[in-house]
């Protein structure tokens, strides 16, 4: 059975929105008010805690924008779309001209904090009753809070750090932005707790596990250049012996192969319920897939889309000849159309490169209810075992710990791609690992953050200004509403 966030009780959603300041829109507050109950009268049964943690998972589905930013802000993809004014916020991010008034950045801020609010609501009430299985629920909530904070800290830097309590409008003016080091400390604390209390195998597909907590812990340390700690956590994931590289990369991202042996943590989506543009944070389908699709498409296999997030020629050229990952990652639309017996037609969108993200693209077989652009069931592979191997390799190499073992992990990933094995050490090995991360994880939203944390962003991203673009601006409306005197990020 796969976790289904639609099981979340709507009246809890309303209650949380009424008592927190981040992430609640009119779309939420207007949900069936007659069903609401007082927040302080909740958490009276194990099912209440279970429903609340399922609700905390729900905001993961809204993190599709985070994935977009990780590629569009990098040298991997261009914003695309219909024209230069189509989703202007993404065009600004692509061109490195984004400012503090940007709808997409505000959505990331508010939706990730909505997830944090839901986890904090659980911890605020963690001692209300005792029951068997409560430690598991708290461990899942800790993982989720760490996940949401990690998404925020890598994008915005210093953050208002709120833990184990609801933040009210009255108390907001006294909440400062905490240094990102303190945010990372909280992330590590939550993940260490989660790893100590979660099972290796989830009782329900889609839930956090010990491996997921350790992998995210290793990633958090890696983002801080804490290589010894990162290597330790990541090698614990490897040592669990429950993950491996999926043998067929060409089908790795198809719906029939979700939650496979390579999956350390996946965000679950479904096409069983429709959605609308008036409430994109309410979706159950993967919105990014429809936006990545071929504009005006008519032909076999695929479905129509909005032609955003189009791969660059530079990314295409990064693949070595014979790399088995190229075709599953990059759809060359002209080559595809020429190979079909039936006619294929499509419209060239803005910044058309001829390429599309083949991992996350709408396919005719996946069309569900409602708007086909918003209801893709394709899960987001948030943490894959290949990513774990490459992060472990990087930590071991850059930390001067064990180049031989690092090379082994790198070559394990290359072997699946049918590429020659390498024999490198030192900086040459570092460069090879980072190049491998680019092609292995292309289209999965990691590239921008990899470039930033390794100091390579200014050399690779057009328009990137060192000392400014390492983080994105705090949404100005959040600064104004908070009244806490938050200083905007430098140079915005």
Image (spheres, rainbow, N blue to C red):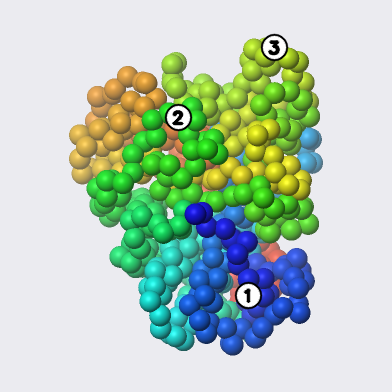
- Please rate how many residues cluster around mark 2, counting C-alpha atoms within 10 Å: few if below 14, some from 14 to 19, many from 20: some
> Measured from the top left, where is residue 460 in percent x and y?
51, 34
Numbered badge on residue 341: 3
Secondary structure category for the residue under label 2: helix
Secondary structure category for the residue under label 3: loop
Q: Nearer the viewer, residue 9 or 82?
A: 9
> Measured from the top left, where is residue 91 in percent x and y?
70, 42
Residue at 65 percent across and 53 percent down: it is 284
Q: Nearer the viewer, residue 218 or 289?
A: 289
| Marks 2/1: CA–CA distance | 40 Å
Number of marks in the rendered image: 3
- Please rate how many residues cluster around mark 3, counting C-alpha atoms within 10 Å: few if below 14, some from 14 to 19, many from 20: few
Numbered badge on residue 104: none
The image quadrant that residue 338 belongs to is top right
| Marks 1/3: CA–CA distance | 53 Å
Residue at 63 percent across and 71 percent down: it is 9
The image quadrant that residue 488 belongs to is bottom right
Q: Taking 190 as reference, is 52 left or right?
A: right
| Marks 3/2: CA–CA distance | 26 Å
Query: Of tags 3 and 2, which is closer to the observer?
Result: 3
Q: Earlier in the sequence, mark 3 or mark 2?
A: 2
Numbered badge on residue 249: 2
Q: Is residue 159 above or below residue 390?
A: below
Q: Which residue is mark 1?
A: 12
């Amino acid at each position: 059975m796969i976790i289904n966030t639609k099981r979340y009780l709507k009246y809890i959603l309303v209650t949380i929105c009424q008592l927190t300041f981040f992430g609640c829109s009119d779309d939420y507050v207007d949900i069936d008010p007659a069903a609401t109950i007082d927040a302080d009268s909740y958490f009276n049964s194990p099912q209440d805690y279970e429903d609340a943690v399922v609700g905390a998972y729900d905001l993961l589905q809204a993190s599709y924008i985070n994935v977009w930013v990780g590629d569009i802000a990098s040298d991997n993809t261009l914003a695309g779309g219909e024209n230069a004014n189509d989703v202007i916020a993404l065009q600004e991010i692509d061109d490195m001209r984004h400012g503090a008034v940007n709808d997409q950045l505000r959505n990331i801020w508010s939706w990730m904090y909505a997830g944090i609010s839901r986890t904090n609501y659980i911890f605020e009430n963690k001692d209300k009753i005792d029951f068997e299985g409560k430690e598991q629920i708290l461990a899942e909530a800790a993982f989720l809070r760490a996940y949401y904070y990690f998404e925020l800290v890598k994008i915005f830097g210093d953050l208002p750090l709120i833990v184990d309590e609801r933040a009210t409008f009255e108390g907001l003016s006294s909440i400062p932005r905490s240094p990102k080091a303190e945010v990372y400390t909280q992330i590590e604390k939550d993940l260490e707790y989660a790893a100590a209390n979660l099972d290796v195998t989830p009782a329900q597909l889609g839930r956090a596990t010990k491996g997921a907590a350790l992998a995210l812990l290793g990633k958090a340390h890696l983002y801080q250049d804490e290589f010894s700690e990162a290597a330790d956590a990541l090698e614990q994931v490897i040592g669990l012996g429950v993950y491996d590289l999926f043998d067929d990369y060409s089908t790795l991202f198809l719906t029939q192969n979700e939650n496979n042996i390579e999956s350390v943590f996946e965000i679950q989506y479904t096409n069983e319920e429709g959605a609308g543009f008036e409430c994109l944070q309410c979706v159950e389908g993967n919105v990014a897939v429809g936006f990545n699709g071929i504009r005006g498409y008519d032909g076999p296999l695929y479905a129509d889309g909005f032609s955003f997030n189009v791969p660059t020629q530079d990314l295409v050229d990064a693949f070595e000849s014979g790399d088995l990952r190229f075709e599953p990652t990059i759809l060359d639309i002209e080559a595809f159309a020429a190979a079909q017996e039936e006619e294929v037609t499509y419209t060239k969108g803005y910044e058309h490169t001829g390429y599309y993200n083949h991992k996350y693209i709408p396919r005719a077989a996946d069309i569900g209810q409602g708007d086909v652009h918003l209801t893709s069931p394709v899960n987001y592979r948030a943490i894959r075992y290949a990513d774990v191997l490459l992060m472990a390799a990087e930590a071991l190499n850059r930390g001067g710990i064990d180049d031989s073992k690092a090379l082994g992990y790198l070559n394990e990933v290359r072997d699946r791609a049918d590429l020659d094995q390498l024999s490198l050490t030192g900086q040459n090995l570092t460069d090879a690992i980072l190049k491998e991360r680019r092609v292995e994880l292309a289209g999965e939203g990691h590239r921008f953050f990899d470039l930033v944390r390794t100091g390579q962003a200014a050399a690779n991203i057009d328009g990137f200004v060192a000392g400014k673009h390492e983080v994105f601006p705090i949404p100005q409306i959040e600064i104004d509403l908070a009244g806490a005197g938050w200083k905007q990020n430098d140079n915005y």
